[in-house]
Image (cartoon, coloured by chain):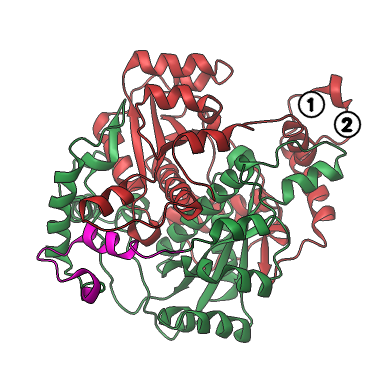
Chain colours: A red, B green
Amino acid sequence: MTPNVIQDMQRAMAERFGEDFEIPLASDGLASLAQHRVHRDFLDRPVDPELLKMLCACAMSAPSKSDLQQRDIIIIQDPDLRARIAALMPQYAWVRTAPAMVIFCLNGRRLPQIAEWRGKPFPNDHCDLLFNAVADAAIALAWFQASVNMAGLGGCPVSEIRNHAELISEWLRLPDKVALYAGFCLGWPSTSGHITPRLPLSVTVHHDRFTDDHARGDIEAYDERREALHPARRQRDPDVWGTANVYGWSEDKAGQYAEPLRTDFGAYLRRRKFNLT
Amino acid sequence: MTPNVIQDMQRAMAERFGEDFEIPLASDGLASLAQHRVHRDFLDRPVDPELLKMLCACAMSAPSKSDLQQRDIIIIQDPDLRARIAALMPQYAWVRTAPAMVIFCLNGRRLPQIAEWRGKPFPNDHCDLLFNAVADAAIALAWFQASVNMAGLGGCPVSEIRNHAELISEWLRLPDKVALYAGFCLGWPSTSGHITPRLPLSVTVHHDRFTDDHARGDIEAYDERREALHPARRQRDPDVWGTANVYGWSEDKAGQYAEPLRTDFGAYLRRRKFNLT
């Protein structure tokens, strides 16, 4: 264990949540989870294929609902395919420049396939199949992110691929009941990054029953704390929304989702033969 | 770093995936992810509230789609509430006996709430809201599981709570657009557990395009490998399905999902005011 790991964790938690934490127990692994940073700028140094394979294996070691393993990873190695994906989202330079990219998919196909192979009926082609497959894909991505961090690499999820879901699904030859979840770009980070402040646990961790009676005040305080640590580079659409005096997380997120986004995503999932009823 | 961490990772990967891996890079954190084991038997030793809080903070440090933070944790501390939940699923003894239990929820409520507070329209009440909230909740649970493991504790997700979704949602006073994802039981493990073998990467990790042309043979080999390592204690419903000669993962999972399960889960989500279109 690194000598100052308890202090490192305390510092990360204070920055993340704006309160002092007791750290009753520490390890380098826990510190890595607590200190998670997003990375989008990378050194010009490749990610070795054996290393990438090992990171995928770590991701696939994560929990999976009833051990059903309803998720897959597609490693993007063809430069032409990578360039076509990157060209769809030129505003995200790292999709073009990151040394490696993988795509996580939900797989609702394997379970009915197994049923067919084993001569069993499959009366479970409904919303729960989608729900479990989304969760499995997200768990694998989370474990992948943790592995990337713990290997000394850095990276970021790319859910923008879902804004071009049909086209990318076609390029990846996804069959029925397999759908895109998120991309992930990774490499050796060229900057130190920073800890993203998160909502205080008073808002997101409850005891015995859910309550958000006090949430508004706590979120406003979070907006101010976050803005003081990492001021927004620019306000979103000031021509539409005017210029806010306190431009914090909630103002930014409310503005981001004031435009219709991925309103056709349910239709995409249905075209992929997921049954949402 | 523990001296034999590379060998530990190699052994875990071989047991997990049935092939020899190159480990170009290792750490205690990576080894913990690779060696993940599920734990359902615990010592009679409490989980300190400060430790549980720290584990929740680690979970909430995980990535979140567009930093929207659409997930919450509810710590179950009222013994009566805990007993009522456990009584719904007596076949899962650990829900009653584990020293601690938390419940992960998806929160599609905070984003429209913020929009309202900031005087913005919210034209995004559709399937994408649900999709992102499920993913955020699953990512938080995954990071929680990793934290539990790295703290030397053990635990298991409990998705059985979704088989009693209405009742438990009522007990937890979940408001509209907040829904159950999964419970999680944890404590200090009393047994060493074992590594669950997973599908080989030839089935779940693809290059540039999805393919499952060769999946059937690879899954049959996996069935045999897994059954040899950890034979099923009993076959599922032999009175209905007969007794299989090779009773592996695919036979077991096909049998499990040959009965209708959670067919009303979509209706539950709609009653919680999620829009699935």
Chain to which the residue tagged by mark 2 belongs: A
Residue B14, x across and y down, in percent: 17, 52
Q: Nearer the viewer, residue A136 or A265?
A: A265
Taking the magenta stretch, the answer to whether it contains residue A240 is: no
Residue A121, x across and y down, in percent: 31, 57
In the image: residue B106, left or right of residue A211: left
Q: Nearer the viewer, residue B243 or B117?
A: B243
For label 1, the crowd category at 10 Å Cα-Cα, with few meaning under 14, some 14 to 19 and many 20 or more, is some
State which tag comes first along the sequence, 1 or 2. Answer: 1
Tell me the number on the disc at residue A250. none
> Which segment did they paint magenta?
B238-261
Q: Residue at x 74, y 42 (%)?
A: A226
For mark 2, give the secondary structure.
loop
In the image: residue A148, left or right of residue B26: right
For label 2, the crowd category at 10 Å Cα-Cα, with few meaning under 14, some 14 to 19 and many 20 or more, is few
Residue B212, x across and y down, in percent: 24, 37
In the image: residue B223, left or right of residue A206: left
Is the Cβ of the residue at disc 1 closer than 8 Å to that at disc 2? yes
Picture quadrant of residue A145: top left
- In the rendered image, which residue does mark 1 sit on? A235
Taking the magenta stretch, the answer to whether it contains residue B244 is: yes
CA separation in Å, label 1 and label 2: 8 Å
Residue B240, x across and y down, in percent: 24, 72
- In the rendered image, which residue does mark 2 sit on? A244
Q: Residue at x 17, y 71 (%)?
A: B242
For mark 1, give the secondary structure.
loop
